Amino acid sequence: MREILLVVDVQPSFAPPDWLVTGIRTLAKRMPSVATVERHDESHTPFDRQLGWHPARDDDSLVDVDRVFIKYGYLPPREMLDYLVAMQLARVLVCGMQTETCVLAAGYMLFDAGLTPTLITDLTIGSSLDRTGELGTALWRHHFRQLTTIAQLAA
């Protein structure tokens, strides 16, 4: 099956737990992979003005991947979407930080482009609203239906 791993915002600004970084690093070594890194530029996205917080201006991915795409805000950049569409993938395996926000936003963008986003439920963590990621997983199941786990991928 032609697939790729999309690692969403696993970067220092979001303080991902070690188990998440380790699990994603292990999987990224086994398959083609890309990542998004969210950086701050108030002229792109008003994090400071509206939320009183912002990611760093110079964060990098904590996972070595084939290609990193910089984004400003919740949505992945168009450049990443064009890259993935051109690959004619069977599915995009999605993992990372903030299941109910940035990860879900990536799912919508992938789905709208005709791709098959598939959430790796045990390699994602929610935002401070829901660290378990259960809310984001439920929304993902409702909108895209495609879920998997590390064990299912290894089988």
Image: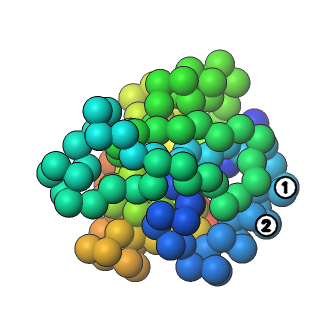
Do tag 1 and tag 2 residues touch (Cβ < 8 Å)? yes
The CA distance from mark 1 to mark 2 is 7 Å
x and y percent of residue 22 in the render? 72, 73
Q: Residues within 10 Å of mark 2 (few under 14, many from 20)?
A: few
Q: Which residue is mark 1?
A: 30
Rendered image coloring scheme:
rainbow
x and y percent of residue 38 in the render? 46, 48
Q: Is 71 placed left or right of 1 in the picture?
A: left
Q: Is 121 placed left or right of 19 in the picture?
A: left
**Three-letter code, disc 1:** Arg
Q: Residues within 10 Å of mark 1 (few under 14, many from 20)?
A: few
Element at label 2: helix
**Three-letter code, disc 2:** Thr
Determine if residue 145 is in view: no
**Is residue 94 positioned above or below 69 on the image?**
below
x and y percent of residue 73 in the render? 35, 43
Any mark on residue 129, and which? Answer: none
**Is residue 83 positioned above or below 49 on the image?**
above
Q: Which residue is located at x 39 percent, y 29 percent?
A: 112
**Is residue 131 positioned above or below 123 on the image?**
below
Determine if residue 30 is in view: yes
Q: Which residue is located at x 64 percent, y 80 percent?
A: 19
Q: Which residue is located at x 54 percent, y 49 percent?
A: 58
Q: Which residue is mark 2?
A: 26
Q: Which residue is located at x 70 percent, y 24 percent?
A: 87
Quadrant location, the N terminus: top right
Quadrant location, the C terminus: bottom right
